[in-house]
Amino acid sequence: MNTYKKFTERMQKIADINNSAALLQWDQEVYMPPKSAGRRAQQLSTLAGLAHELFTADDTGHLLDELANADLSEAEKANVSYTKAEYDKYKKVPKEFVEKTSAAVSKAFQSWNNAKQQKNFALYAPDLEALLELKLQECEYLGYEEHPYNAQLDIYEKNMTVDQLEVLFGQVKARLFPFIEKIYHAEQVSDELMYQHFDKDKQWDYGIEILKQIGYDLDAGRQDVSSHPFTTNFSATDVRVTTRIDENNLSEMLWSTIHEGGHALYEQGLKDENYGLPSGAYLTLGMHESQSRLWENNVGRSLNFWQGNFARLQEVFPSQLGKHNANDFFKAMNKVQPSPIRTNADELTYHFHVLIRYEIEKELFEKKLKVADLKDKWNAMYKQYLGLDIKNDAEGVLQDIHWSHGSFGYFPTYSIGSFYAAQFYAQAVQDIPGVEDDIRAKNPAKLLEWLQKNIHQYGRRYKADELCKRVTGEILNFDYFMRYIEEKYASIYDLSGVGV
Amino acid sequence: MNTYKKFTERMQKIADINNSAALLQWDQEVYMPPKSAGRRAQQLSTLAGLAHELFTADDTGHLLDELANADLSEAEKANVSYTKAEYDKYKKVPKEFVEKTSAAVSKAFQSWNNAKQQKNFALYAPDLEALLELKLQECEYLGYEEHPYNAQLDIYEKNMTVDQLEVLFGQVKARLFPFIEKIYHAEQVSDELMYQHFDKDKQWDYGIEILKQIGYDLDAGRQDVSSHPFTTNFSATDVRVTTRIDENNLSEMLWSTIHEGGHALYEQGLKDENYGLPSGAYLTLGMHESQSRLWENNVGRSLNFWQGNFARLQEVFPSQLGKHNANDFFKAMNKVQPSPIRTNADELTYHFHVLIRYEIEKELFEKKLKVADLKDKWNAMYKQYLGLDIKNDAEGVLQDIHWSHGSFGYFPTYSIGSFYAAQFYAQAVQDIPGVEDDIRAKNPAKLLEWLQKNIHQYGRRYKADELCKRVTGEILNFDYFMRYIEEKYASIYDLSGVGV
């Protein structure tokens, strides 16, 4: 067997273990009976340890060394060099540390769950603190330049740094904040129509219709219900989404479905033949989020999309929506209003939720902020940026699952994704003649094809900056997002006479 | 850390991998999207290889050697010596062989599925033949005395041999066959009441009620739907059952639910503290089946049980069952009639289904029978033992999933389990004052407690023969089964005037 084939087989075995763990996690959130939380945590820890052990084994290093000078295609070379960098990085992390972290994550997750139900941050703080200690330790293993938080950012958004984020969130503060202020001063729109009674089963069926419309392949995936919607995959041929249905709020199901659907299209668009290799894996979480946001916001919250889809939705819910039109619906779904829960936020105030988390995480990793003070800091920042008084911990500092998963440095990718989405969508409209007519005709297949061809198929072949440049001619540029929202929100709010 | 603790940790890690694989298999049968069959097979193969590698590693051997002379409790000694025997046995099987077999199983399973849908055995025969070749090879690795099939039997029913089964099935032929003949000549009973329309959701809910009644803990398990009902577990705290619901046949759901429930009670009755160790695992498949059969047949198909439960069932299905009584229902559920499908068979003709498979498997492993001739052999034996003409392969040789899983030597455990069940139940009635009154009062908790105390808690502490002797004073004795059916069926059929 040649060395590259041996390398591929090893990478596939590691992927098999990681994907098995992903199934255990999926199950944990959708179907697992409560009493088995402890054993499941142990099983996940064992799998995490095994995957780490196999990846960082000397054998893997030898294969990579042999391949460094082998006669390979460009695509093969990219797989090898990406893997080599990861190998050198993770080789420094002891297996025991990986298992310990996995166990700490499971503990923190259970404790977060409990604390959230009890609306009491204090019940969770000690486990979060223990986990944060491990993550700080992890930064040292992984190595970083300038800021320990960079080591965490790099896990989710390779090559992203605090310096770059300061610039990006600087723009959010300088340009998005005043724009939202203008909206606050304009005449408000009503979103009451979303808050009627919508039968659960009908919502479920309609969600499936929408998933099919955007091109999600239900023979290579499935939808289930979970308390926190997510997408996961165990190969490009098994990419699962979950949704959450609120009978008294249609938005919940609708945009979580399109959002997760967008994530899933990316995973289904990876090439199955590259399973286990960098070229078979999503590029960065920001890139992942660009796909979910593009479908959720640029497509799913556009007037255009609903000009095509509203009639069918009225058919499903005639008594609730019969007297409304696509434009009412478009306005309702884009109502801008500060609210305490990130996942329910409109697409503008959303970025302040992210900003708050980013600033908190940065300070935690600078050890300027202690876990014990986290809640007060949170509440103060919600007052500062969104003008809100947080009523209780469940709708405040306990709302997100991420920290309990040990995911610090993850939140910024949500904003990065939105900004990429605007840039990609603008390019797609230029590149694909009539694409918005297609979307209105409920047939966005060409858009999906464009995304597959320009983004999905490459996996980790290029760096995020490089890929963005290949697709749009330039690296991430916040202007696209501003242009997109300025145009869109001018059609929802009368901003002409509003001076700030 | 002391050596026994190291040993326990290693065994738990192996269990973690095996239990992860079990979740992948569960998912494969209940929720997995069709396109991912190939990748899932690969993932299962990787996990099987890893578990095997870890178990048969030299390190494991060293731990076992160290423990051979350590100062241990009797229970600890039993764990070590059981594991040592397995280690010596499986050490001889190469990891590549395990992975190859796992992949061949996945292939055969897919191909069986397809062939069954097409009702065409020929589509599956080549994959089955390839798998059988591997199983024959496995016998050589594992070692055996006298008969290669003994190596397979030993996997499912430790220490069971062809010689013993010849005696057991000799009794089936000599005593059960003539008893069934008598029933065929008696006045027949009607089971028409089972074949009405019973709403799916109501059946589901009633099944859950019954599971709770027998003591199944839904916080440490769950029920789903699959095409072939089964029980699986990933620890004693996560023991899952599946059922199958036929809207036009109440029996399907009812006895599959109680049957799988019985299996699940055994797994939930194992001690979680023994997770990963022989003492934390079911003894043999025959012992497992004794638990499912005891609940299904000795309890669930008794007049006594339905004297307690029929009124509630009538409440759920008033129009279907309002005019019937518990005795009608009891007779209907115990109607004896030869039929082509094993899983639908009554508890008497059932053993001829097993006998046929046993004789076929024995000949396959003696290489007296070829896979190519399997179908003809099957059909001929169904004619011989049950007087039936098999209409097509789906209701004939393709009906069971087992061979596609590479499970040869598994079927006999179904009969062994039924015979154990009769013996255990007879003992329980002697040991527990008023237990049948409790069952009639819908409160069989003492029976479950008795089973937990006498059987479940021990896991693999004793050999099956030893355990049976501890519980009932003697090893497996077919007389108990004959006594049980003679008494029961005399209350259903008038056998007094029937001479054969």
Image: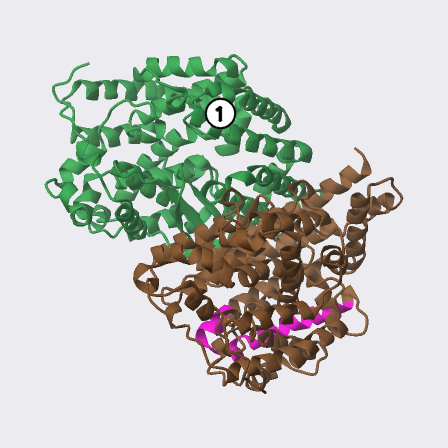
Chain colours: A green, B brown
Magenta includes B133? Answer: yes
Q: Could you tell me which residue is drawn at 41 percent across and 20 percent down?
A: A393
Tag 1: Cα neighbours inside 10 Å, few (<14), some, or many (≥20)? many
Q: Position of residue A471 (x, y in %)?
A: 37, 41
* Residue A235 appears in view: no
Chain of the residue on which disc 1 is drawn: A
Q: Position of residue B113 (x, y in %)?
A: 49, 68
- Within the image, what quadrant is residue B413 found in? bottom right
* Residue B219 appears in view: yes
From what the image shows, is residue A307 above or below residue A445?
above
Q: Position of residue B186 (x, y in %)?
A: 50, 82
Q: Which residue is mark 1?
A: A161
Q: Position of residue A424 (x, y in %)?
A: 33, 39
Q: Identify which amino acid the numbered label 1 is placed on.
A: Thr
Q: Secondary structure at mark 1?
A: loop
Q: Could you tell me which residue is drawn at 51 percent across and 39 percent down?
A: A34
Q: Is residue A27 left or right of residue B67?
A: left
Magenta includes B387? Answer: no
Q: Could you tell me which residue is drawn at 33 percent across and 28 percent down?
A: A478
- Quadrant in the picture for the N terminus of chain A: bottom right
Q: Could you tell me which residue is drawn at 34 percent across and 51 percent down?
A: A449
Q: Is residue A380 left or right of residue A327?
A: right
Q: Residue furthest right?
A: B69
Please state which of residues A25 and A160 is positioned toward the viewer in this rendering.
A25
| Magenta stretch: dominant secondary structure | helix
- Within the image, what quadrant is residue A324 found in? top left
- Quadrant in the picture for the C terminus of chain A: top left
From what the image shows, is residue A172 above or below residue B56?
above
- Give the magenta-colored segment's residue range: B113-140
